[in-house]
Image: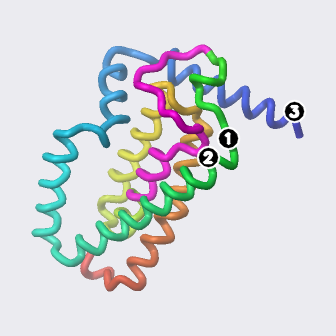
Amino acid sequence: MAQLWGLLRGLDYTLFHWINEAWANRWFDAFFPWLTDLDRNKVFLWGALPVALAWWLYAKRGRALKVILAMALAIGVCDAVAFQFLKPLVKRSRPTEAGVAMTLRVRPPGSYGFPSNHACNTFAGAAVLGLAEPPLLWPALAAAALVAYSRVYVGVHFPADVLAGALLGLLIGGAVGAGLVRFGGLSRSSR
């Protein structure tokens, strides 16, 4: 069993090296740090996001409100499970503390790395949105995948961290989204 874990860790480190260093370029160096820290961007938080939400609420009214609340619930559950329970339980170091060759492109977080909260939260939101609004499923999943990739590219997570976060997010977001569709009054005809 120890041999299998060693093989998986080696694969994780190799993939991390490819994403973080071998596939690096100037465009990615500009784009992925911006994307990974979008939750700290004031123009996004106080400009683009409120405008998009206001437009969606105006266009879809009660339906949009239900979806937004369901997304908030899924993201909140993901955040709590990943940050409060799994990270302290697993205690996996981030690449900056693991002694691997790497390039750090953002300020390192102060918590453990497994699972990635960014991946968990974005995939949970994407799952809810995609189940409630099926035409948005693939764009939402693509956006979540870019955020997850960005976490490895900027050097704050290993690929296994973001994979676990993505799977947990899909599980929680899928459950909340399915509940919203089934019990939230979102019929197929209104999609």
Front-most of residues 113 and 111: 111
Camera-near label (1 vs 3) is: 1
Q: Is residue 113 magenta?
A: yes
- Could you tell me residue 166's position as x and y percent? 52, 50
Q: Are marks 2 and 1 in contact (CB under 8 Å)?
A: yes
Q: Is residue 124 magenta?
A: yes
Amino acid on which the number 1 mark rests in the picture: Lys
In which quadrant will I find the N terminus? top right
Residue at left offset 36%, top offset 20%:
29
Q: Which residue is mark 3?
A: 3
- Per the model, the C-alpha gap separating discs 2 and 3 is 24 Å
- 94 left or right of 131? right
Relative vertical location of residue 45 with respect to residue 66 in this rendering, above or below: above
Q: Judging from the image, what secondary structure is the residue with disc 2 in?
A: helix
- Could you tell me residue 118's position as x and y percent? 45, 45
Q: Judging from the image, what secondary structure is the residue with disc 3 in?
A: helix
- Could you tell me residue 150's position as x and y percent? 43, 33
Residue at left offset 48%, top offset 55%:
79
Q: Which residue is mark 2?
A: 87
- Per the model, the C-alpha gap separating discs 1 and 3 is 21 Å
Label 2 or label 3, whichever comes before in sequence order: 3
In which quadrant will I find the C terminus? bottom left
- 32 left or right of 42? right
Label 1: how many Cα within 10 Å (few below 14, some 14–19, many 20+): few
Q: Which residue is mark 1?
A: 91
Secondary structure mostly taken by the magenta-highlighted segment of the chain: loop
Relative vertical location of residue 25 with respect to residue 94 in this rendering, above or below: above
Per the rendered image, the range of residues in magenta is 101-125
Amino acid on which the number 3 mark rests in the picture: Gln
